Image: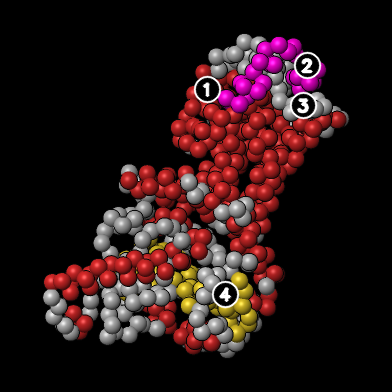
């Protein structure tokens, strides 16, 4: 976007300079599309940013317990009591190890209808505190609204498009703001509160926009890697270039533990039996990977507890040991502590003979992120992925995610994110007010075209690059351009400068 700014800074000294109305027109289209989504993103993002403070207030009877320094009940006892509180056909899929002594222990169960339910227990006396639907938990709804508008894949694509078009809005906004002619730099950085009416709204909108531009750009760039369409493609590209997740995380290495010796020597199978058993084992392993690993996909957890670098990674499988007994949860928790992971993490529980225990540690400091796969029979650590194993892109995304969520430097980070988010919501409101005040009756109110199309090579290059980097946005850019020419092109060639344009300039 600096190319756009430099080009337009040199393109003229007045509001009537070549390219001004073209920039204004594209800023108008971008803002018109982005405004409603920006308000949703700002409100939901601010709420989610303060999730650690909000949730205990919403569910104090479930999340908060009295800590008197008493020893914790064994994890296996807690899991057994959670099972007893659920229907017999419910399957335990996730254990959430609390990060503070005053927090309850949570187990997530998958019900027969596919929905998930959390059971909360007092970790000291084993008392069942209650249950809560994972899908209807307030912060889960807020998160899904933030990411998908609660509309599934179509909503996810809409939010991704809104984020991409925000880049156009930022670039054109900075170019329009750039001081021209007699405008003083101070007027461009400080709102002129002595004005009234539409000029006051314009001054506030422009000044607020320039102060928020850098934060808005950071929000977009750190949020897009989590998007469902472009984010997945970006992750695959980073991995292929050895800049993303470590080798093997995306299936590059065969990660499967060996059968225990006692089981390997039990039978002597014929080649056909061996082949059939291998095929069966492969299907079972695939089912286990899909069925027993919901914790390894960020959207499958009630809270985002999976690092970006391994968020969709296939997991290794445990041996299909019919004669072996799975290790209890308490043994896995003790093993995690011996590996340096003591609290504030999530364990995806195995639900089949080939499933593994998966520990996902997603702290505020990205350098402490851990993903550990443990064989459910032998306790062997099949893979231990740490921040140092990430590629350069994954390391950058990890830091960006922590900052984006307001986690990296505590409450100050939360306040900064909230200020930027709510400021962007105000930008949407002020832009809407400005448009409504100057909009001619029975008209969309889009700024008219230039008499002669200006070269604007820097601007066009910037749009082309954005369209190439974000293909979904590129398609909509072409659609908007074609629709604009088809619907408004002929009329704009006949019209003169209207009072509407003159007032803006």
Label 2: element kind: loop
Q: Quadrant of residue 487?
A: top right
Q: Which residue is mark 4?
A: 118
Q: Which residues are magenta?
A: 481-505
Instruction: Measure the alpha-carbon separation of dots 1 and 2.
Output: 26 Å
Report if the CB atoms under discs 1 and 4 are less than 8 Å apart.
no
Q: Nearer the viewer, mark 3 or mark 4?
A: 3
Q: Nearer the viewer, mark 1 or mark 2?
A: 2
Return the mark for residue 498.
2
- Answer with mark 1 or mark 3, whichever residue precedes in sequence: 3
Quarter of the C terminus within the rendering: top right
Q: Which residue is mark 1?
A: 460
Report if the CB atoms under discs 3 and 4 are less than 8 Å apart.
no
Please tell me which residue lies in front, 206 or 153: 153
**Residue drawn at x 59%, y 57% as measured from the top left:** 144
Which secondary structure class fits the magenta region best? helix
- Answer with mark 1 or mark 4, whichever residue precedes in sequence: 4
56 left or right, relative to 326: right
């Amino acid at each position: 976007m600096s190319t756009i700014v430099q080009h337009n800074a040199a393109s003229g000294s007045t509001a009537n300079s070549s390219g001004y109305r073209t920039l204004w027109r594209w800023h108008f289209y971008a803002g018109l599309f982005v405004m409603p989504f920006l308000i949703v993103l700002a409100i939901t993002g601010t709420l989610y940013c303060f999730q650690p403070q909000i949730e205990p207030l919403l569910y104090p009877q479930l999340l908060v317990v009295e800590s008197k320094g008493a020893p914790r009940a064994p994890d296996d006892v807690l899991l057994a009591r959670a099972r007893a509180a659920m229907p017999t056909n419910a399957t335990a899929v996730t254990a959430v190890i609390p990060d503070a002594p005053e927090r309850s222990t949570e187990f997530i169960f998958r019900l027969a209808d596919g929905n998930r339910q959390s059971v909360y227990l007092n970790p000291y006396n084993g008392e069942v505190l209650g249950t809560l639907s994972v899908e209807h938990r307030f912060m889960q709804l807020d998160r899904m609204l933030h990411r998908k508008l609660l509309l599934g894949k179509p909503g996810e694509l809409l939010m991704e498009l809104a984020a991409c078009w925000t880049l156009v809005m930022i670039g054109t906004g900075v170019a329009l703001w750039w001081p021209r002619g007699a405008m003083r730099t101070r007027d461009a950085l400080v709102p002129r509160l002595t004005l009234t009416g539409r000029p006051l709204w314009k001054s506030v909108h422009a000044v607020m926009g320039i102060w928020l531009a850098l934060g808005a750009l950071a929000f977009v760039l750190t949020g897009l890697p989590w998007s469902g369409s472009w984010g997945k493609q970006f992750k695959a590209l980073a991995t292929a270039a050895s800049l993303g997740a470590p080798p093997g995380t995306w299936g590059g290495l065969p990660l499967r533990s060996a059968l225990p010796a006692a089981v390997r020597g039990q039978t002597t199978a014929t080649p056909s039996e061996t082949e059939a058993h291998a095929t069966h084992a492969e299907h079972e392993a695939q089912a286990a990977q899909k069925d027993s690993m919901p914790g390894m996909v960020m959207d499958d957890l009630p809270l985002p507890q999976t690092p970006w670098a391994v968020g969709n990674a296939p997991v290794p499988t445990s041996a299909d040991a019919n004669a072996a007994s799975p290790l209890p949860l308490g043994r896995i928790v003790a093993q995690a502590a011996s590996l340096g992971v003591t609290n504030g993490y999530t364990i995806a529980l195995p639900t089949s003979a080939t499933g593994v225990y998966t520990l996902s540690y997603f702290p505020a400091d990205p350098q402490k992120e851990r993903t550990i796969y443990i064989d459910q029979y032998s306790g062997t650590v099949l893979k231990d992925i740490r921040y140092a194993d990430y590629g350069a892109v994954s390391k950058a995304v990890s830091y960006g995610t922590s900052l984006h969520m307001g986690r990296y430097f505590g409450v100050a980070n939360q306040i900064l994110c909230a200020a930027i988010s709510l400021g962007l919501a105000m930008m949407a409101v002020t832009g809407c007010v400005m448009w409504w005040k100057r909009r001619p009756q029975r008209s969309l109110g889009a700024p008219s075209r230039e008499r002669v199309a200006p070269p604007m090579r820097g601007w066009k290059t910037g749009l082309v690059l954005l369209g190439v980097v974000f293909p979904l946005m590129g398609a909509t850019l072409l659609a908007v351009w074609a629709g604009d020419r088809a619907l408004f092109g002929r009329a704009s060639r006949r019209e003169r400068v209207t009072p509407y344009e003159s007032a803006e300039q």
